[in-house]
Image (cartoon, rainbow, N blue to C red):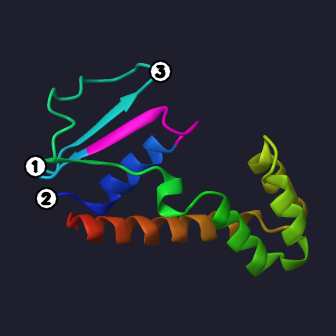
Amino acid sequence: MNIKFNDVLELFELVNFGSPFDHEGYICKESGRTYFYSEFGDNEEELPDDINDEKYLTIPHKNELNLGNNLAFDFTLEYLPTEYEKVRSMFNRKGAYARFKSLLESAGKIEEWYKFDAKHTEDALREWCTEQGII
């Protein structure tokens, strides 16, 4: 299959923007062509009629790659271990990521978070691509 990792990463980021499952992304295993669909319209083209066939891979949601709350918890254990219980309790209510990022900013760790998040996202997505046989 002829597809670049950066194209997969870009599609993954689009799919995972906003609320879970508002957006969908697909890769054709035969051509490497990518497709994107949003519940909010602005779709440049229609999805193929056979999009549910086995010849298409569905781009995973970040939670499927263990990149949701667990990533925040892992970061906290490594960079702010004394705040771990506080962060765990943050994620029991709505608005957790806003509070988490506020905590990171006040602790001077926001840049480390963005680097940590980007590295772990890329690593997990590369592993997924390898498992799917697309890279």
> Which is in the foreground here, disc 3 or disc 2?
3
Q: Quadrant of residue 115?
A: bottom right
Rounded to the nearest angstrom, the CA distance separating label 3 from label 1 is 27 Å
Name the amino acid type tagged 3: Phe
Type of secondary structure dominating the magenta stretch: loop
Q: Are marks 2 and 1 in contact (CB under 8 Å)?
A: yes
Q: Which residues are magenta?
A: 17-26
Magenta span contains residue 19: yes
Residue located 62% across and 71% down the image: 116
Magenta span contains residue 127: no
Name the amino acid type tagged 2: Asn
The spot of residue 2 in percent (x, y) is: 13, 58
Does residue 36 sit above or below 55 in this rendering? above
Q: For mark 2, what is the residue?
A: 2
Task: Tell me, for residue 31, which label it has, or none.
Answer: 1
Q: From the image, which quarter does the N terminus lie in?
A: bottom left
Q: Secondary structure at mark 1?
A: loop
Does residue 39 sit above or below 100 in this rendering? above
Question: Mark 1 or mark 2, which is nearer the start of the sequence?
Answer: 2
Name the amino acid type tagged 1: Ser
Lateral position of residue 71 relative to residue 108, left or right: left
Residue located 30% across and 24% down the image: 44
